[in-house]
């Protein structure tokens, strides 16, 4: 038997913070690829601490539903899941390349494949592009469009910006958009000045966040000038300084993210049968 | 009725020897050795076996349900389902000497009407699928304890465990429930005809990890992390919580961890040999370490406890002082909603509070002066 554990942040205050986690977990349940699928949280229940013991499977794939490597993937999750002999060096990551490491936990007799976070997987690049396509309603969007990938910026360590830059660079390499920029909420280059960084009239702005909440639904729209008051909403596209801003919701809510989670487990040796091959291309593997 | 498939499975297992819930069956050179608590051991040849099994069909179908349908020896799932019908649970009896399990005939008698159990605010009924000719297969119903006497027709009926997630998210007033084991589960729903696995999944959504930890506790290996261990482990913004004074941990447990706030039974202490005075609670399932809500609240209290105390002077009548107590009590006991609009005799009445504010507040709240020493 094999089980999937999706480790996410969750919230004590906002019941919707865990919506994407549940949506992706449900989509994966539907595929039948895993005998058990369990969501675990830092700020909800089951807590990181108590999730793995609820599983009967001997082999467990843990996928952090986080954007970047850093405090949560390197310290909090390994500590709370009681990984034995954990050391971030085991991932041999350059900041965005963590893939998997085989571990044991002190409270259960199981083999645990601890995977890199969802946000740094190469497939996430495709999800960002897909987001741009669905927001503009144009499957070929790119020509005369700029694309901004937006991240939080300064966190407890500096790898969060690396994930943003990594995907921005990969999308830039596609030569599909007129310009691609990595922008941040609280460090330079700032998302507030988004229009300064693009010459194209149209700019798609994709926030690389797991869930929609305060940052993606209040801060960023107001900071970019899409609206004076987030409660009044904003147009897509919205006119700002002679540009049209196509602002999408948090990329983590995109249903293709479920596929990225599966890719993480496949990289770690999960037996997914034909689940992944079946979904290659534009159609989500899982989901609708 | 004992079915052909059940009999074949039984005979196959008999070659290894069966000793389960009172049924003993072994293959012997001359036939089969059969025994139940009500019937002495006897030797039966293969031809006579079907006839011999008929009067003890409860034992046979019981064996088939647990060993074939449920299986999962040693799992929390199996232990929980056995607990649901008061069946003995191997390896856990020593830790629970007060529980007297029911025999197979007693359970079979009770399963026709259904056997009820309470898990937090969940009422769980185990019953036979087929009441006329029970073949041993059980199904499970689950609803809110407050709906025990409500007609199922008046409840929202679900058969998909995932629906429990939605129900557990908000209380009756639509407020978010970050603590799943808070005694604020909304009522008005029922899950009916669940399989054993579906029941476990449903319970997992209502009360995550409670069956796993309950099972560990029954086996005597619940891994408790006491306050100081848990607090010391924290990093980042929660790094400070191990500085919370010993007496404040006591107040915190009284604020957050008692039965009126959480249905888990607190098994953690300040330290292994340093128990808190606050009652640990009567809950069925254990709490094995301070939860994330307690840690988050502890951070605030650590901050607040770092302030120095000052003596303030302010003018209040005796009744006004009592009213402050009444206001704090009403909030702490979540009673505000039940205080009637015009009940001016109640200190936490809105008009009474507004009057006090009008009379005693300055620009920054209560008009108080630091006493000069």
Image (cartoon, coloured by chain):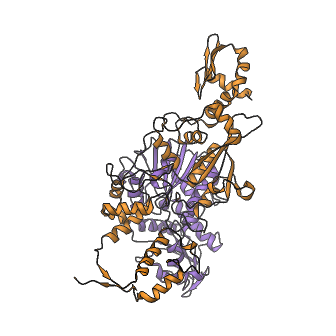
Query: Residue extending furthest left?
Result: B373
Apparent colour of chain A: purple
Location of residue B237 in the rendering, given as x and y in whole percent from the top left corner: 36, 66
Location of residue B103 in the rendering, given as x and y in whole percent from the top left corner: 61, 31
How many marks overall? 0
Image position of B306 with respect to B127: above or below: below
Residue pictured at 67% horizontal, 57% vertical = B189
Residue A99 seen by the camera: no
Location of residue B159 in the rendering, given as x and y in whole percent from the top left corner: 69, 52
A101 or A283: which is nearer to us? A101
For this view, does B284 lie left or right of residue A84? right
A237 or A211: which is nearer to us? A211
Residue B122 seen by the camera: yes
Q: Which quadrant of the structure image shows residue B114?
A: top right
Residue pictured at 60% horizontal, 68% vertical = B174
Quadrant in the picture for the N terminus of chain A = top right
A71 or B347: which is nearer to us? B347
Residue pictured at 41% horizontal, 53% vertical = B289
Query: Residue extending furthest top?
Result: B30
For this view, does B308 lie left or right of residue A10? left
Identify by letter the chain in orange: B
Location of residue B16 in the rendering, given as x and y in whole percent from the top left corner: 58, 21
Quadrant in the picture for the C terminus of chain A = bottom right
Query: Residue extending furthest right?
Result: B132
């Amino acid at each position: 038997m094999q089980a999937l554990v999706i480790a996410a942040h969750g919230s004590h205050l906002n019941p919707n913070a865990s919506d994407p986690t549940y949506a992706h977990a449900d989509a994966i349940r539907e595929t039948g690829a895993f005998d058990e699928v369990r969501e675990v949280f830092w700020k909800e229940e089951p807590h990181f601490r108590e999730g793995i013991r609820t599983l009967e499977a001997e082999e467990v794939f843990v996928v952090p539903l986080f954007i970047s490597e850093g405090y949560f993937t390197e310290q909090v999750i390994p500590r709370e899941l009681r990984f034995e002999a954990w050391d971030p060096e085991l991932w041999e990551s350059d900041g965005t390349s963590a893939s998997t490491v085989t571990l044991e936990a002190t409270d259960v007799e199981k083999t645990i494949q601890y995977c890199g976070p969802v946000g740094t997987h190469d497939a996430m690049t495709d999800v960002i592009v897909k987001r741009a396509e669905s927001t503009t309603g144009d499957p070929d969007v790119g020509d005369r469009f700029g694309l901004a990938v937006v991240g939080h910026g300064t966190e407890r360590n500096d790898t969060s910006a690396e994930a943003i830059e990594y995907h921005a660079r990969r999308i830039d390499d596609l030569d599909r958009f007129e310009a691609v920029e990595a922008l941040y909420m609280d460090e330079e280059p700032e998302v507030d000045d988004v229009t300064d960084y693009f010459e194209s009239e149209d700019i798609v702005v994709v926030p690389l966040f797991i869930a929609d909440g305060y940052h993606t639904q209040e801060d960023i729209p107001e900071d970019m000038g899409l609206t004076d008051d987030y409660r009044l909403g904003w147009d897509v596209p919205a006119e700002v300084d002679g540009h049209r801003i196509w602002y999408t919701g948090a990329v983590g809510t995109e249903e293709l993210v479920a596929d990225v989670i599966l890719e993480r487990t496949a990289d770690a040796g999960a037996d997914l049968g034909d689940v992944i091959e079946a979904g290659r291309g534009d159609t989500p593997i899982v989901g609708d | 009725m004992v079915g052909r498939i059940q009999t074949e499975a039984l005979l196959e297992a008999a070659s290894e020897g069966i000793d389960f819930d009172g049924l003993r069956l072994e293959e012997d050179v001359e036939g089969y050795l059969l025994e139940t608590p009500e019937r002495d051991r006897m030797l039966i040849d293969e031809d006579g076996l079907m006839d011999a099994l008929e009067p003890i069909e409860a034992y046979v179908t019981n064996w088939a349900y647990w060993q074939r349908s449920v299986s999962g020896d040693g799992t929390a799932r199996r232990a929980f389902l056995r607990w649901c019908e008061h069946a003995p649970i191997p390896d856990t009896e020593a830790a629970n000497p007060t529980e007297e399990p029911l025999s197979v005939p007693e359970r079979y008698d009770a399963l026709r009407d259904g056997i009820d159990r309470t898990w937090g605010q969940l009422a769980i009924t185990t019953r036979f699928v087929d009441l006329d000719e029970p073949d041993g297969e059980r199904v499970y119903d689950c609803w809110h304890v407050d709906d025990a006497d409500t007609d199922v027709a008046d409840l929202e009926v679900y058969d998909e465990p995932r629906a429990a997630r939605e129900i557990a998210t908000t209380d009756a007033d639509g407020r978010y429930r970050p603590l799943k084991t808070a005694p604020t589960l909304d009522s008005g729903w029922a899950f009916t005809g669940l399989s054993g696995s579906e029941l476990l999944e449903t319970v997992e959504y209502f009360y995550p990890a409670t069956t796993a930890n309950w099972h560990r506790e029954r086996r005597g290996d619940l891994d408790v992390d006491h306050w100081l261990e848990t607090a010391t482990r924290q990093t980042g913004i929660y790094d400070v919580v191990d500085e919370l004074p010993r007496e404040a941990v006591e107040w915190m447990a009284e604020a957050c961890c008692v039965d009126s706030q959480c249905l888990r039974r607190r098994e953690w202490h300040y330290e292994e040999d340093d128990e808190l005075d606050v009652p640990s609670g009567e809950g069925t399932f254990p709490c094995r370490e301070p939860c994330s809500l307690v840690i988050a609240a502890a951070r605030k209290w650590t901050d607040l406890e770092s302030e120095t105390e000052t003596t303030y002077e302010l003018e209040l009548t005796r009744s006004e002082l009592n009213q402050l107590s009444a206001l704090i009590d009403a909030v702490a006991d979540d009673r505000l909603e039940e205080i009637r609009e015009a009940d001016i005799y109640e200190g936490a009445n809105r008009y009474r509070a507004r009057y006090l504010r009008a009379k005693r507040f300055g620009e920054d709240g209560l008009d108080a002066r630091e006493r000069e020493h």
